[in-house]
Image: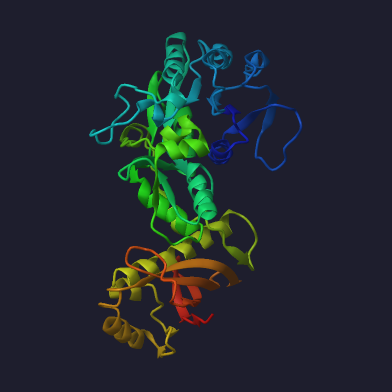
């Protein structure tokens, strides 16, 4: 299909562009000027501005086979209604899709209800107060022969962006991770690439007059997200609760209320009916060891293939951390090559061969984390070959609650990893203490 995409230059729009193109569709971006933007992956551009509905009169030409409206709302209900009319009217009687972007905030606080679905009544918070009316305006187009669809994304994360990036920035600036409102606040979340795939599925096969929740994880504790954001910022401290009134001084009252909104929202319907399968790492994992903490990469070209290998290496190091923190000897050992691995411990003990490493690990790991453990962050990756990588890791000692032990030196593990049968494994490791 040839798809007109509003908001194509934005955070979500950039991902949707890539996934539409990967699915064989042609993206025509609605942009404010005709100035070319090379590298975007667009098939074409149409000039228009969603803040000016009149400028959209000629945007949906006869060859446009679908419209995905991702541009943010203007804040004016009349303007947004006029934009929907301008984009949807040319599709009437064609059965072509018009996909509108709303959000789960229209549901309001879900209270004791767990994983509320699309059938739940709306109770919007102030920042999205009129959006249910826009949703209904979109869905009414189904009666006019438009395959009108509403997608409600959860809190979007991934690619180092979205609201979680605010948590990272605040942790870095304040020196302590923050979350807003009550301790038990939960956010439904979705990875931006998983969400992009939902938009593709909605445009391709969602039925007219339907609403879909773009939710990967239904209810993630924001305290956990804050701790992970601190980790991404290099701040190992207990998360700090910020009252809504205080947050309003930074973000404004409407957005502060949104950050403090407690929700549990289901995305099961899209999985069942549209075959949508969100598969990216969860928000906590992404903050802890993903795109929010950049890695220096050498010896490999920039591009998605290298990004995928670096992500796999980071997952391996995260497995090392998990196994060490939870005293899982067998899981830790599974990360080594079976053939002739070598390891020098942080105390200088040299171990050669899988059996020697296994005997040492099974002896010392049980009980090792009673008073302290460590977190591991990949800092540099040098690809010696496509299947061999040298990896610098920062190892920081922490208490069981995750706070930094200030008077204990860091470690500087250095791993040589080899890719075997599609999986990275540790071939050699040296855990060196870093003296002040």
Residue in the image at 45% along x and 39% along y: 246
Foreground pick, 311 / 208: 311
Question: How many labels were placed on the picture?
Answer: 0
User: Which of the colour schemes (rainbow, by chain, secondary structure, one colour) is used?
Assistant: rainbow
Residue 317 position, x and y percent, is 44, 68
Q: Say which quadrant the C terminus sits in.
A: bottom right
Foreground pick, 368 / 69: 368
**Image height check: is 47 above or below 418?**
above
Residue 398 position, x and y percent, is 39, 69
Foreground pick, 153 / 143: 153
Residue 253 position, x and y percent, is 47, 31
- From this viewpoint, is residue 134 visible? yes
Residue in the image at 42% along x and 55% along y: 228
Position of 58 with respect to 193 (left or right) is right
Position of 180 with respect to 56 (left or right) is left
Residue 371 position, x and y percent, is 30, 73
Foreground pick, 158 / 88: 158
Position of 46 with respect to 341 (left or right) is right
- From this viewpoint, is residue 285 visible? no
Residue in the image at 51% along x and 45% along y: 166
């Amino acid at each position: 299909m040839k798809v007109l995409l509003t908001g194509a230059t934005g955070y979500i729009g950039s991902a949707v562009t890539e996934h539409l193109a990967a699915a064989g569709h042609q993206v025509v971006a609605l942009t404010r000027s005709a100035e070319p933007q090379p590298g975007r992956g667009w098939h074409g551009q149409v000039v228009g501005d969603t803040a000016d509905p009149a400028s959209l009169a000629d945007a949906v030409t006869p060859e446009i086979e679908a419209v995905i409206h991702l541009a943010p709302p203007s804040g004016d209900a009349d303007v947004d209604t006029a934009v929907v009319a301008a984009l949807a009217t040319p599709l009437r009687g064609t059965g072509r899709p018009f996909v509108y972007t709303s959000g789960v905030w229209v549901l309001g606080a879900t209270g004791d209800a767990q994983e509320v679905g699309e059938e739940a009544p709306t109770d919007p918070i102030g920042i999205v107060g009129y959006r249910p009316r826009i949703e209904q305006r979109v869905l009414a187009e189904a009666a006019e022969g438009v395959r009108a669809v509403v997608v409600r994304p959860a809190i979007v994360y991934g690619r180092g962006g979205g609201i979680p990036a605010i948590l990272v920035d605040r942790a870095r600036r304040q020196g302590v991770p923050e979350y807003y409102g009550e301790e038990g606040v939960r956010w439904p979340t979705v990875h931006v690439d998983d969400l992009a795939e939902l938009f593709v599925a909605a445009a391709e096969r969602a039925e007219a007059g339907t609403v879909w929740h773009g939710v990967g994880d239904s209810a993630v504790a924001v305290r956990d997200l804050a701790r992970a954001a601190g980790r991404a910022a290099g701040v190992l401290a207990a998360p700090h609760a910020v009252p809504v009134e205080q947050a309003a001084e930074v973000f404004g009252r409407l957005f502060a209320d949104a950050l403090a909104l407690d929700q549990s929202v289901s995305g099961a319907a899209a999985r069942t009916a549209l075959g949508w399968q969100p598969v990216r790492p969860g928000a906590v994992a992404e903050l802890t060891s993903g795109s929010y903490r950049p890695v220096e990469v050498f010896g490999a070209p920039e591009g998605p293939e290298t990004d995928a290998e670096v992500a796999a290496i980071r997952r391996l190091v995260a497995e090392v951390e998990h196994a060490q923190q939870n005293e899982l000897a067998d899981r830790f050992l599974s990360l080594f090559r079976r053939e002739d691995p070598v390891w020098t411990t942080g105390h200088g003990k040299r171990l050669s061969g899988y059996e020697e490493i296994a005997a040492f690990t099974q002896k010392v790991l049980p009980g090792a984390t009673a008073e302290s453990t460590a977190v591991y962050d990949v800092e540099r990756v040098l690809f010696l070959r496509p299947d061999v990588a040298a990896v610098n890791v920062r190892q920081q000692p922490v208490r069981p609650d995750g706070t930094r032990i200030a008077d204990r030196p860091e470690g500087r593990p250095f791993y040589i990893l080899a890719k075997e049968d599609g999986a990275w494994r540790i071939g050699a490791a040296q855990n060196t203490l870093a003296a002040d």
